[in-house]
Amino acid sequence: MVVPSATCGLMGCSYDLPSYEYGADELNMLADSLAVSLVGYDAFTWNVCSIRPEQSYGVTIENPQWYTYEKVTQNDIYSGRMLLNLYKRELNKVDYSALGAADAATYRAIDYALNTYNDYYSSQYAAQFSLMGGSFINATGGYVSDFADTCENYAFRNENDVKNLLSLTVSTKDAFVSYLNFADDRAQSGYPLYDYTINAMQDYLDKVAKQGTDYYLYSLTESMIDGATFLSETEKDRYKTEYSAALTDCFMVGVRELSQGLESYKGNVETTEESYLTAYGNAGRAYYEWMFKQKTGMRNVNMYTVYNDIYQAYVVYNAGLQTAKAQAEQLETTNKAAFDDYKAYKNGDKALLGLDEPQEMMDYLKVAAKKIVPDLKSMPEITFKYMDDTAAEISNALAYYLHSPIDEQNATERITINGYTTAGNPAETLTVLAHEGYPGHLYAYVNAKENGTSLLATLVNCSAFSEGWANYTELALLNNIAEETDDVAVKLYCNESYYATLTGYVASLLNDMMVNYFGYSVEDMVKLGEDRENAQTIVERLMEIPAAYVPYGYGMHVMVELHNSAKAALGERYDECEFNRALLSEGFAPTLDRAKSITSSFVSKKKSAA
């Protein structure tokens, strides 16, 4: 979560603006100011978001430090509320009715951000929220693995970038150890870390430390420096020495000290019979509700209604999946050759459509996407790389796309693939690249950039729309492949994968809500018929990532329903590309409530034009 930084103030734009209603220029000043206040002086975020942060947003980064843990105080909460109230006052001066479409979308992005963080700071549990939701320490490496991701995705555009990443590396020695204060505050507040989390974290840290100078960050940073054409050979040699020393004397020291320090926090909770949020009681439920609202942008939410809605969807989706599986069983006896091909697609022994390399998959997707989305104004160059093995083994991500800088036109877009989880499964890799690239995240973001999205919308986008959209594009791709082929095995594989995707995500969301919101323990799930070992695995998998499946499960469900409702209402007048153009007309991730309004307006206009 991005937390407003009270120290950033209003960047000078609130007190000297005129008192009459503001227009588009003042609105966009306010949007940029709020974006700066949310990001603060986080070097990595600015490196990713902007190639010219000083010129574009008036932000200069000097001697940055890696994230350290600091307990949220009542004064922090009060300052956060005051800052948000100041921004709300300024937003209320904007004449919304006079804004064009793009500026109206910016207005709604500001309103969404202010409402989200106001809910956070206004909660009676605000002081506890940072302890509940902090990902400083978790089973997948916490902010130590985040640092490795930062190095992988940090761009060296000038010497100041080289200095900043070096400063971040040096600061990890103290920053990593500060996370022990997080463990201590959790324990002192009655929310201690479970041994499961500590053991998994230590296992990750020890694997990193054991590699020593063979750890990939040594060779990675050396390669980054070699590629910095603005540095002389003498400067390159100097920075290589400094980076190697920083990794050895700071990063590795911090890793080892954190691992050793965590040992003293074992024994508070030796079993994982229930999730962290369940152990927190009402405060945990309040945190889950806040996260649901933050991820969906929905203001009025009843979690029981949400659960029932998703459960009914699960029944429908699972019925489709079981039908597909029954068809596969019949195929084994009626067409053994086709059945063998179908199994080969599922097992990864055969590439769907003969596509088994990322680049050729993306080339295919760029063409296939024409049936789903309008063409971009210009086709971006897309490159691929693979995660480091240590990170890949514990990562939940099959791949990820990192946004190009908002102020960089015609940027090269990059997708990172988890070779550990995608190895030997080309058919799944194809849909993953549809999700991350065309016509999923990458397409939606580049489209938004071409239409003038704001920095703020990039930072506070609605993840349920973003992930729901990307999941929907996977489903649309599978449907299109099935429709365009006479191959029985391909049709069956695509149909089963379609329903397996729907069923899998909504089932994960149901489990997430049961474990993290409704308080189901391992014993509760066993009573419902779940195998104990599997119930234990579910709790351990979900307890550190509460509401993580809201964007994927709920967002996907809503996106499917929006498309189905538009198709049903318009019949032959429905056009997939035209509808998706409308959905993405207000940036790459408006709130779900806004997406519903866009859909309603689209249908009404099409009907009235008939």
Image: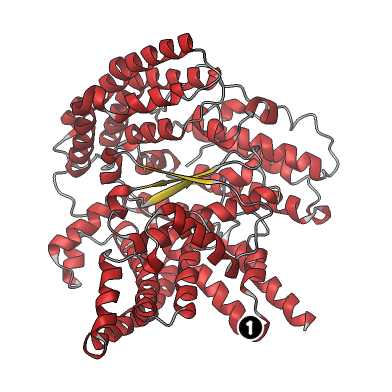
The reply to whether residue 302 is visible in this rendering is no
Total marks placed: 1
Give left or right: position of 560 versus 494: right
The residue sitting at 59% across, 38% down in the picture is: 405
Q: Nearer the viewer, residue 479 or 464?
A: 479
- Seen from this angle, which residue lies furthest bottom? 334
Label 1: how many residues lie within 10 Å, few (<14), some (14-19) or many (20+)?
A: some
**531 sits to left or right of 109:** left
Rendered image quadrant of residue 312: bottom left
- Report whether residue 242 is seen: yes
Position of 24 compared to 122: left or right?
Answer: right
Q: Would residue 249 be found to the left or right of residue 462 on screen?
A: left
Colour convention: secondary structure
- Say if 563 sits above or below 59 in the image: below
For label 1, the SS is helix
Q: Nearer the viewer, residue 361 or 133?
A: 361
Quadrant in which the C terminus is drawn: bottom right
Q: Is residue 234 above or below residue 454?
A: above
Residue 331 percent coordinates (x, y): 27, 86
Say which residue appears at 50% left-offset and 74% top-offset: 480
Residue 127 in percent (x, y) is at 42, 38
Residue at the (28%, 17%) spot, across then down: 248
Rendered location of residue 19, percent (x, y): 84, 38
Q: Nearer the viewer, residue 103 or 230?
A: 230
Q: Hey, which quadrant is residue 285 in on the image?
A: bottom left
Q: Amino acid at mark 1?
A: Ala
Q: Position of residue 187 (x, y in %)?
A: 25, 35
Q: Is residue 471 above or below residue 82?
A: below
Residue carrying label 1: 569
